[in-house]
Image (cartoon, grey):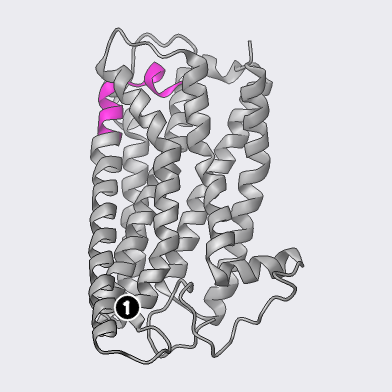
Amino acid sequence: MVNVPYAVLHSLLSCLIPPANLLVIVAVCQLMRKQPGTSYVYILNLATADLLVGVMCITEALDNILDRDFNRSKSFCLLRIAMSMTPCIASILTLLLISLDRYLAVKLPLSYPTLLKKTPLVLSLVVLWMLSFLFGHLPLILPSLQRGNYTGYCGLLHVAKSEYLYAICFGVFAPSLLVLVCLHVSVGSIAYVQHTRLRCACAPAGPLPARLRHFKALRTVLIVLVAFSLSWGPYLVGGTVQAACSSCNLPAPLKDALFLLGQTNSLINPLIYALYSRDVRSHLAKLLRCRVKGQVKPLASNVPTVESWGRSRPEEPSP
């Protein structure tokens, strides 16, 4: 029988995640036409991955409505797990690229504009989706990772062996989170040194240096990272515990709840952009035909801000 609260929440996510991320995609595309930037491309890629998660929520909601009739096929279950895991892996790898992009902007401000041109940018995205597809479809690629006694309940540990979860956790998520933390600590150290030098030099009040502006731009990335960890962390920890402990059997409703919590991250990300990225917030307000604090300011302005996402050159006008 269908878990009614789970089915209702899944249906709600399937109705909210795709429109929210589509709005972010449209807003970022408008920003890129007026002010091209590497960060905007990566944000667009992250919103696309979240949109795909929302599409998979739609299929899972339909499965709940049909009383899990689709789960009787092991092949269909494997394909559904693969299509669900691929955009989730792409999300964390995109966060890694965004943080690396901001790190290079802070660490190498003079050579940064020449580092990430079109070819390296496209190549990084191609490698990202290839890795996401490879790890997401690993049980389909390697039949040895599939469980032989499929019971008809479609879950990661019900259709795939523990080795697959180990590969996901310790081959993708754990290294990515470690690198992300190291990048943020390094950028924070650079920003602290810059702030100390400014105070010692008694610099007059004015626009912050380019490095500090890039550091402020990392605030949104850090919030997205924390939200991702809080959303998917419990599911990965619970799955790892069950995979490592043969006598530990988590109840199916708890597994469903943890996986549902992870999928809510694809709804949280566009909300974070709307709250903390001034550029995206302004364009979202225009798309929704509403006003922010009484008036939506135009994109082109000569007043620099510290909340701007894509700043590849210090002399570019801030939105």
Q: In the figure, residue 115 lies in which quadrant?
A: bottom left
Q: Is residue 253 visible?
A: yes
Residue 73: x %, y % from top left: 50, 17
Q: Is residue 313 above or below residue 1?
A: below
Q: Is residue 173 above or below residue 219?
A: above
35 left or right of 170 in image: right
The quadrant the C terminus occupies is bottom right
State the count of labels: 1
Q: Is residue 154 visible?
A: no
> Is residue 89 or residue 272 the one in the foreground?
272
Q: Is residue 207 above or below residue 7?
A: below
Residue 238: x %, y % from top left: 37, 24
301 left or right of 96 in image: right
Residue 76: x %, y % from top left: 49, 24
Q: Residue at x 40, y 48 (%)?
A: 226
Q: Is residue 156 in the magenta section?
A: yes
Q: Residue at x 25, y 18 (%)?
A: 244
> Is residue 74 or residue 304 the one in the foreground?
304
> Is residue 190 or residue 260 the one in the foreground?
190
Q: Secondary structure at mark 1?
A: helix
The quadrant the N terminus occupies is top right
Q: Amino acid at mark 1?
A: Arg
Badge 1 local density, few (<14 within 10 Å), some, or many (20+)? Answer: many
Q: Is residue 53 in the magenta section?
A: no
- Which residue is tagged 1? 211
Residue 146: x %, y % from top left: 33, 20
Q: Is residue 312 above or below residue 135?
A: below
Chain part drawn in magenta: 155-168
The secondary structure that most of the magenta stretch takes on is helix
Q: Residue at x 53, y 18 (%)?
A: 71
Q: In the figure, residue 2 lies in which quadrant?
A: top right
Q: In the figure, residue 126 lies in which quadrant?
A: bottom left
